[in-house]
Structure formats: C-alpha cells, structure tokens
Amino acid sequence: MELPLLEGRQAAPARPGLAQGYFAKECPACARCGAPSRQRRSQHAGLDIVQEKRAAREEAKAVEITITRPTFEQCAEIYIREHWSIWSKKHRNRWPSSLKRYAYATIGKLTIPEIKPSHVYELLRPIWVEKRETANRVRGRIETIIAKNVDVDDTDFRNPAELTKQLREKLPRRPKRVVRHHPALPYAEASQFMTDLSAAAGTATSMLRFLILTACRTNEVVDARWSEIDRPSSTWKIPGDRMKMHQDHVVPLSGHALAILDCMRDGARGELIFPNPDGGTFSENAMLAVLDRLGYSHVTVHGFRSTFATWAEECTDYPDGVREAALAHKYKSATTAAYQRGQKLEKRRALMKDWAQFLAGADVISFPEVG
C-alpha cells in the first residue's frame, strides 16, 4: 500500500552520482543528458577492459618465463654438476649421453612449465619397446630433473614425465618380460676353470681371477685401487659409490687373492690395481674377452657370483646372513636388516678362505707373473 504524499511536499530530487536502483549503471544526470559512462565509452571504442588486463597479465607472464626460467637442458646440466662428485663412472657417462640422445631434441629448449605429457610421449615412443631399460631410465631422469625444479609447496603441479595410466596406455604395448639370469658356470666345473685361467697371462686374466675369488661385481674390480687395500688386516674396502647398495663394503681377502695383489704390485706405481696397457681402467668387456679366448663364451663374468652362491648354499653350512653379506646383497626383510647391521667380517673371512680352497681343488694353483 502506497502512502500518499503530504500536501505541500514534493519528493526529494535524486542526488547526482547516486545509483537509481541496484542494477543502475549510470548516474541519473548522465542518463538525462545522454553522456556515455566509462564502460559505454570503452565499449564504444571497441575495447574490453577485462580482456585488456588479462592479455597484459599473460604477456607479462610470458616475458617473465622467457627472462628468468631456465630451459630443461640447463636444468639438467645443473643437476648433473651437483651430483657429479658422488656419481660412479657409469652414471657420469650415462646421464648426459642418454638425455642428449633421447630428450634434448624434444624438450631441451622448453622451460619446465612448457613441458607437457605429450612431449614425453613423443620422445619415449620410438624406444619404448625396442629399448625398454633405456626408455625407463630416460623417463625417470626427466621426471627427477623436473621435480627438482618445481616448488615443493606447489600442490597443483603434476609432473608431465610421471608414468600415469594415460601415458602408459598411450605408449606402445610391451611384450611380457622374460626373466633371464646371467649364464653361470656350474660350481663342479669351477676348479678346472681356475686351473685353465691360471695358465693364461695378462692383467685382464688376473683381474678375472681376483673377481672370482672375491665374488664381487665387474665394476667394483675394474676400478679397484691400492688405497682401498688394507694389507695388515687382509681386507679390501670398496667405497659406496661403486656399490649397488651405495654403502661401503669390506671384502676379506684370502691368501690366493693376496697372491694376485702381490703379483700386480710388483713394479707397479699407479693407483689402479688392474690398469689397461694405457694406464687407465679396462672396459667391462675385457674379462668377457678372456672367457671367450679360453672357450667359455657360454658363461658371463657376473655369473660367477651365482656359482659362488650355489656352492655356498649346497656345499657349506654357513648361514644365509653370512652368504648374503659376502655378496653385498640387501636383505629382503627390513626387520632382518635391522638385526643384521654387522658385516660379519670374520665369518665371511672363513667362507672366502673355503671358497679359495675349493677353487684350488686338489692341486695348488700357481699364479704366474703378469705379462
């Protein structure tokens, strides 16, 4: 119900500048005089203020990215430099070469925010099936470098190199993996093999004998150095950067292993125990070549660790923990690992002595001077 106006009173005129109603866009004066408002002027000029501001922000963001953010290749080089001193020789070779060969052509010049899952798919697709392990390593390295260069508090970020279900389904389907163990020499034939090996000359031959007697891995022996040998305690301490588990490993040396070291030390002045003819490290294939020359190309160097493990399990009473410690294996159970932190050095010393005697057989193997 409307109230009537009192006689003699008129409605107060609207004050200039006040909106007439909630949805009013112009002041009454402007509406009366027909003068266009600021918004009408902007529209009349064909400009949209919101779009102008958005475009300005995007342009500033693009300039900021171009100026301040490094490319993926630059990020990778920084990451490699930071880890160079703690990496093994294998990592120093493989990280730069794999990224240069498979990643830089596609994402090397892009900044981290510009990399998309489609880029990762594009570089992985040609090698995903044919070079399975290489593809896995390349993807993992890209993911690591990207993660290194993202703010830890950025919860909205999703790593484009992560092996998501979308990426996995998009990549070519791989055939089912067939597990192949390293071909190993049966331990019953090990004694005869060592007899054949002891008759051969050469540094690579001595290196292979030492590897078998210590049950170590190829890279651990190839890079062995005199500074790692403690002759008074008859031990060899391999630094963690050469170990698969990245922990120092102390190897007790039998008399036969020490005899090889004495032979190698005679007249040698370099730091490497088993240097190649040029004074550098041997290729990891050098010992394979020795096997091939002796007619044992059907077995591998790494397979001698399996030969040792099978012999120790079937022919000795040493506990699992001692045998696993001799191979520098990681315990499958975290609980077991917590109780087995000691390296069982003296027990392993007895085990390696028995292994050396088994390899010697009935006859004592002589160790000729290295030619």
Image (cartoon, rainbow, N blue to C red):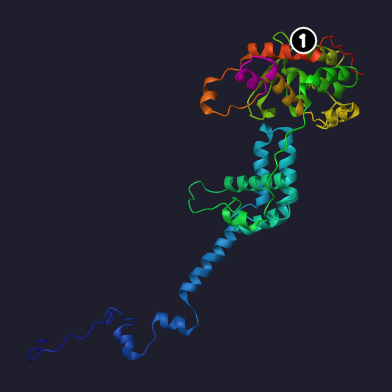
Residue at x-position 79% and y-position 15%: 359
The image shows residue 73, relative to residue 353, as above or below, that is below
Asked whether residue 319 is drawn in magenta, I would say yes
Q: In what element is the residue under mark 1?
A: helix
* Image-based side of 124 in relation to 342, left or right: right
Image position, residue 156 (x, y; %): 49, 54
Give the camera-side residue of 211 and 360.
360
Write the start and end of the magenta stretch as one range.
314-327
Is residue 269 at all visible to an observer of this figure? no
Give the camera-side residue of 263 and 95.
263
**Amino acid type of the residue that numbered disc 1 sits on in the rendered structure:** Gly
Which residue is labeled 1 in the image?
255
Asked whether residue 111 is drawn in magenta, I would say no
Q: Main secondary structure of the magenta part?
A: helix
* Image-based side of 255 in relation to 344, left or right: right
Give the camera-side residue of 66 and 15.
66
Image position, residue 216 (x, y; %): 73, 23
